[in-house]
Structure formats: C-alpha cells, structure tokens
Amino acid sequence: MSPAAPDLDVLALGSAIVDVIASADDETVAAHGLAKGTMALVDAARAEELYGRMGPAVEVSGGSAANTVAGVASFGAAAGFIGKVRDDQLGQVFAHDIRSIGVHYDTPPATSGEPTARCLVLVTPDGERTMSTFLGAATGLAADDVEPAVVEAAKVTYLEGYLWDPPEAIDALRRAIAVAHGADRLVAFTLSDPFCVDRHRDEFLDLIARDVDVLFANEVEILSLFQVEDVKEALERVRDLCQVVAVTRSEHGSVVVSGAETVAVPAVPVERVVDTTGAGDLYAAGFLFGLARGESWQRCAELGSLAAAEVISHIGARPQVPLASLV
Amino acid sequence: MSPAAPDLDVLALGSAIVDVIASADDETVAAHGLAKGTMALVDAARAEELYGRMGPAVEVSGGSAANTVAGVASFGAAAGFIGKVRDDQLGQVFAHDIRSIGVHYDTPPATSGEPTARCLVLVTPDGERTMSTFLGAATGLAADDVEPAVVEAAKVTYLEGYLWDPPEAIDALRRAIAVAHGADRLVAFTLSDPFCVDRHRDEFLDLIARDVDVLFANEVEILSLFQVEDVKEALERVRDLCQVVAVTRSEHGSVVVSGAETVAVPAVPVERVVDTTGAGDLYAAGFLFGLARGESWQRCAELGSLAAAEVISHIGARPQVPLASLV
C-alpha cells in the first residue's frame, strides 16, 4: 500500500534540469552561434562544446515548471513535482534543492542512460538569458512516473510545453491530463518558448482547445501559436478556448482574458534587472498560487508580477527570499 | 616529450573543492551542531546528513588556494593550480571553471575512490560562513601530481595549510617546496584556519621557520600558531622567520611585517558585506599578484584589500568582475 498522496495546491510536470549559468557579452553569444534570448535544444556533443567555451559558471537547480512549483512553495502553498533525473551528482542536486523547499518530489531517478539534464545559460549585461538545453535523462519521463493519486490530490496540474519535445514524455502528460480531468481538477499549461510553439503548434492548438483550463504565454509565444502579428487578435482567438489565459508582457506587466473579462496588470518595478531567467516561470507561480487560493484574476496577475519581480532582481531562476514575505 | 611548462606568476597547491552554498539563520547553524564562522572536516555520512538538512543551494567552484589563483588570473597574471578531483560531474565543474578563467590546470582526475570534494557552506544574514568540508578525492593528491617543470616555471608556489589534513598530500607539498627552492623560487603559505593550525601546529612552525618565504594568516590563526593572546607578540615572533608576513584583520585591513618594516593597510570599504567566503583567499590573490609584479608591501596589501572587498560583496568565493578592471 502506498502512502496517501498529499493534498497539493499545484502539481507540475516538467523537465528536471540543472542550470549552468555564466555571464557573457553579446559578441560571445553571437560567436557561439546562439540566438539571443531564446532556448535551443542541443545534443550531448554540442552541450560539451558550448560548455567548454563558457566562462566560470554557477550550478543551480532549474527547469521551467520546477521553478514554478519552487515559487508556489515559496508562497507557502503545497506543491509537487514530477520529472526525471539520472542517479548522478546533478540529479542529487536537483532532488535535494526541490525537496529542501518543501516540494513533494518522488519521481525515481533513471539508473542508466543519459545524465541529468542541464541548461547552459548565458546571461548578457542587459539581464537577457540565452539557453542551450541538453535534455538527457529528462526525456525518460514516462506514464508510469505519473501516480494517479498524486494528480487527483492536486487542485491544479501544471504542464510545460517543453515536455512535448521528448516523445516518451507525452504519454506521461496525457495520463496526467486524463486523471486530473477525471477528478474534476484544473489543467494549466505554458507555451514555454516561441520555438517550442513552432515545433508543436498543431498539438498545442488541439491540446488548448480540448484539455487546457489555464493557459500561460508571453506575447511572442501567443503570436506564434496563432501565426498572427497582433496580440489583440491572438487574445480574441484564445479567449474562448480556455477558462483563463494570462499573457505576460515583460516590463508592461500582463493581460488576463477570461470569457468576456480582460484585465491588464502592471509589472512590479525593480531597481535593476539582473537576470530575467525564470520571469515567466515565477509569474506562473504567483498566478497559480492565487488561483489555488481562490483569488480574482486581477489578484492572481498581481501575485505573478510580484514573484517575477523578485526573481529578475538576482542571478538564478528561483526565489531567494520567501515569496510569502512579500505578499 | 611533455610540452614546455608555462611561465607562471603564481602556482597554487590546494584542495580541489566545489562549494555548496545555502543561506541559513544562526539558529539553524547551531541546531546542526556547527561552530559559526569555522571550517570543520566531515566524513561522507556527516556530509550527507548535513546536506539533507540544508536549504536549496548553489554549486560553485571553491577551494581556498584555487580561489586565490582564480583571483590572480582575474588580475591578469599567469596562474596555475595543482589539486585532485574525481572523474565525476562535480570534478568536471571544478576543472571547467578554473580553466575557463585561464588558470593552467592539468592534474589528472582520480578514476576510482571517493567523489570530488565539496564544502557545505551556510551563509548567515551577517555574511559569515560556516563550512563543513568533505575532502573526498582531494585527499588523493600525490607527489606524482607535482610536475617539477611547472613548479620551476612559477615565480611563487603557494600552499594552503588545509593540505596538511590528508596525509598523502604532504608528499606533494614537500616535493613542491624542494623544487621551488631548488630553482630559487618563492614559497608562500597560508595558515588557512585556526582549527587547521591546532591540528598541525608543530609541523607548521617547523615549515615556516625552514621553508616559507611569504606567510598569510588572519589574527586568530597567528595567535593560535604561537598560542599567545596578543597579536603584536605573535607578529614579533613571526617577523624574522619569513621574508614577509601578511596578517588580515577583517574590517581593520591588514598588517604586513617584513624584517624591521611594519605596514598597516586599511580595508577597502564595501556597501554591504554579503558573504565573507573567500575574503582571505582573495586577499592572498591581490598580495601575490603584487609580489609577482615586484610591487611594495604596501601596494601588495592594498591589492589584497581590493580583491577581498570585491569578493565579500556577493555570494561566492571567486571574483564576479575582472579584478584587473578595479586596479
């Protein structure tokens, strides 16, 4: 008999990744053949080559959805995570960090195959980050890793678009969606990245229409989704597909559309933008925290802005101070 | 035929360590049974237990002497390092980071035995750090790892007191000293830590009298060395044993004694002390950089203060901006 699943506010499925963060100037980013501000998937050989050319780095747990639940936990809510590491040192780092902040995490690590995923992050002086992700063991997430009782016990199950990249993980996502909706729970989804939308546009449109209750995107992603050039048009097209859609607009804050309602919420000003890594992830954290607490869309978006402002004020994609202390 | 050794300003021998840094309050430090502000050696089991109780952490290359040569390289001088990692992920991180800043490092990693050393660092709100070090593979440093040509080509060979802890490493240190002095090069040494002095007081006194040209210590360490209570008395006792002795005094700067000369140099003020990890290491970096450049003791100490001020202004024990840009 397995122990009872904990009651969770938010459960996330995502890639379990350790970020390897280094400073770089714009010339270096270009010289490495990288498109500034984007996330590209790389294989082991390319990751090795890029790492060899990077400056001294800091290793810190990351992963988009993992950052989000770290934020949810930091607000004081109950959070869980499902994602795959290898039984190696970086896998231990990932598991330690997410558990140490109180996130329920018990996906068994892979005992063979590729090492734990890493994301090579180059932070330019303007605070933008350019990411090269080697997915490694994260691609091994399988349907078996999704314990139905855990999904049933979560108010919201949050899925990252990035998980559509490894083919096997899709079974895990479909299982999570089926269980969540079977238990009358909410399914939230983030488009993750404009290139990710490019890779999976049809599946994403189908998923959003059928399975997504709460959608997160930034402006570039939502434009890419509908292949239009006007954000208003994209918002009108997505409006009736989901219960609520939150579109982040960097320093302009965010717009939330839900049925006939449209709410624009400003960004929380920060003294200096140090590293934008995790801004979207933490916006989702604040929003989902508010959602689980039954707050208005306005308040959900404000909580999102609050969490995003904290995380862009320092290096790294997880909060450095308890977000609960900022509310 | 091996390639010609590079001309180095400073070559360091030390423990090759990855720091695992987390924030903690004073109560947590005490609850873990740790003496605040000190470094304790721990075995694998204790390291595991402490790590399990730590909050989310950041991994970043460390090691006292390794931090020092990272600083020397950051000033724009030629630096090298000898120290042992395992062929594991943290070992790759250590090797990558030190090479990426231009430090000559080619000690072969161990292919069996204990994993790469780590230092669990708890940083309290006052910026103090409390360290628990699991030496692991670092204890495997052996005389064979000291290539005579590399030592002969270095103006100064810098040794950390910590290396007296693993018994085998002493052979490596003795070989380095013999080669350096045989080639009319300088030997520098740091007392590292008051508890380290306690463990090896007689060996250290003997070493300083016979083999050390340049000695680094803080006030607590130099008092411990001579088991006296007055820093002036300690300075008089050490004055004639070495060519030069630099004693750091935290916010009071440093005192340099050399023959009849005594020079007091103030600290460089910082806006906020974030993390004192690496302050002594970086002071030594600035001082050794000045020494290799033939600067006066006054100027050497000023360069030490400059480097120390940079490193205590942020989390982590290596410079975040090129120190050359601050000179």
Image (cartoon, coloured by chain):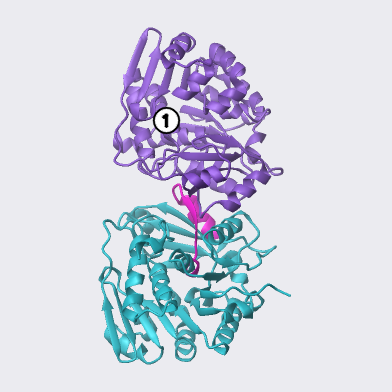
Chain colours: A cyan, B purple
Q: Is residue B187 visible?
A: no
Residue wearing tag 1:
B285
Name, please, the residue furthest toward the right: A1
Q: Position of residue A316 (x, y in %)?
A: 42, 57
Residue visible at 51% across and 39% down in the picture:
B130
Q: Is B175 left or right of B26, judged from the image as shown?
A: right
Q: Is residue A168 magenta?
A: no
Magenta residues, start to end: A45-66
* Amino acid type at image mark 1: Ala
Front residue of A82 and B62: A82
Q: Residues within 10 Å of mark 1 (few under 14, many from 20)?
A: many
Q: Nearer the viewer, residue B186 or B214?
A: B214
Q: Nearer the viewer, residue A129 or A241?
A: A241
Which chain letter matches label 1?
B
Q: Quadrant of residue A266?
A: bottom left
Q: Is residue A165 above or below residue B305?
A: below
Residue A228 place in picture, x, y as percent:
32, 85
Quarter occupied by residue A295: bottom left
**Residue at left offset 42%, top offset 69%:** A281
Question: Against B129, is A190 above or below?
Answer: below
Q: Where is residue B173, by image quadrant?
A: top right
| Percent of width and height locating residue A94 | 56, 59
- Quadrant where the C terminus of chain A sits is bottom left
